[in-house]
Image (cartoon, rainbow, N blue to C red):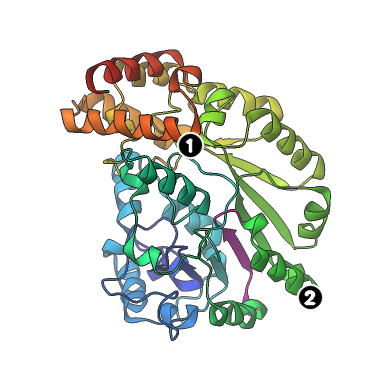
Amino acid sequence: MAERSKTYCPLPFIHSHASVNGRWKPCCNSTWTLPTEDSYFVKESSTHHKWFNSIFMERLRSDLLSGVKNPMCDVCWKQEEITGKSIRKRYVDKMGHLADIDNPKIKYLDLKLSNECNLACRMCDYTNSNQIHKDVSVIEEQNLHLPGNWERSIQHEKQIDSKGIKKAPKHIIDEIKSLLPDLRVLKLTGGEPTIIPEVLELFDICIKEGYAKNLQLNITTNGTKFNSKFLEKIKKFKDVYLNISCDGYGKVYDYIRHPFNWDKFAERINDIKESGVGASITAVPQMYNIENIDQLQEWGDQVGIPIGLNNILQPQTNYNSLRYVPTHILEQARKMIKRNNESHQLMKTIDSLCSEKYDPTESEEAEIVKSVQSIDTVRNQNYKDYLEPMTAEWLERLFKKYA
């Protein structure tokens, strides 16, 4: 059947996504952006409906039904080449029942209504967390090196307020309300959605108007702001699933997910477990945590929450990328990390990197040192106090060479 072609994905037939940086994309996994300046934060005429029925999406749907690998989905094509698995393949089974290829309709909204957040994670950027905007300003004031993933965006600068916050405009919020009757899945990310006023307002509307009973609610969250009142509210939806971001165990968590700490995070997870709300944890494998992931997995087993490891930090040119990690550290991680469905893609990536044995250039090594040093300085941290032994030892050698 046509819908089961080798490139088929149900998302473009049911789904609309607008990133917090103001770009329309076929899904959050895509790195593709419009080859124009069209942006729902800039162009008041832009809407989810117009994007869903645009020439870009019409072409994508046609290609996916015809076996053509459209470049909008390059992330999945590359994942499948390396591991044989991808988000596309997962959604064929997960969301295929919602798709009508003859009558595409928005039934699944993936919303990022603001970049307002309470954390400033090292691998993130200030378009996705306004807290990083504070660190960027301090780094510039002190004439320190600005990490590549924290560089300022001219377009973003036009849209943020004095606190570095950028919100979706009112016409988008109004349009979302009009789409609610047909929705079956509502996914919310951020920023941190649990502190965004518009998200909480949307929940109240769904409950008051009776839409919640027909809605599957997916929240991508850092898991730091849950309380009993909030958990009881979201239980009024048909199904609720929390995808909790956590990139390390113990001190490694403290280092990456500033300014929260591991002990408080573990308490929040216990509260979520006791509430009965479905949840999983997703970590982003990176330079800082690759030697720590096995400990995170062990903790996940103890509390009964799976640890997903499929979101490998991209792009490979990011100073924090696994590509720059020495082979001996990767090989040790490969021995320690538990092999399961959640770690399949990571293990394939590590195998590939160990075979490649990439030798970073001097400029790439210097970028690592300067980036770590800048963030440590503005946060009054020192990598030696937080990271695992081999990773800290490797960085210390680089610091002696370039600092």
User: Quadrant where the C terminus lies?
Assistant: top left
The image quadrant that residue 321 belongs to is: top left
Q: Position of residue 208 (x, y in %)?
A: 80, 75
Q: CA distance from mark 2 to mark 1?
A: 36 Å
Q: Is residue 290 above or below residue 108?
A: above
> Which residue is located at x 34 percent, y 34 percent?
371
For disc 1, the neighbor class at 10 Å (few under 14, some 14 to 19, many from 20) is many
Q: Which residue is at the front of the view, 127 or 16?
A: 127
Q: Position of residue 164 (x, y in %)?
A: 49, 59
Whether residue 307 sits left or right of residue 50 in the image: it is right
Q: Which residue is at the front of the view, 28 or 113?
A: 113
Whether residue 205 sits left or right of residue 316 in the image: it is right
> Which residue is located at x 73 percent, y 38 percent?
268
Q: Is residue 339 above or below residue 127?
A: above
Please tell me whether residue 22 belongs to the stretch shown in magenta: no
- Kindly check if marks 2 and 1 are in contact, taking CB atoms under 8 A apart as contact: no
Residue located beneath label 1 in the image: 309
Q: Is residue 394 above or below residue 173?
A: above
Q: Position of residue 28 (x, y in %)?
A: 45, 58
Residue kind at label 1, given as amino acid type: Leu
Whether residue 321 sits left or right of residue 52 in the image: it is left
Q: Which residue is at the front of the view, 294 or 368?
A: 368
Q: Secondary structure at mark 2?
A: loop
Residue kind at label 2, given as amino acid type: Gly
Whether residue 283 sits left or right of residue 80 in the image: it is right
Residue located beneath label 2 in the image: 210
Q: Position of residue 376 (x, y in %)?
A: 44, 30
The answer to whether any part of residue 231 appears in the image is yes
Give, as a single range, the part of the protein colored magenta: 182-192
The image quadrant that residue 189 belongs to is: bottom right
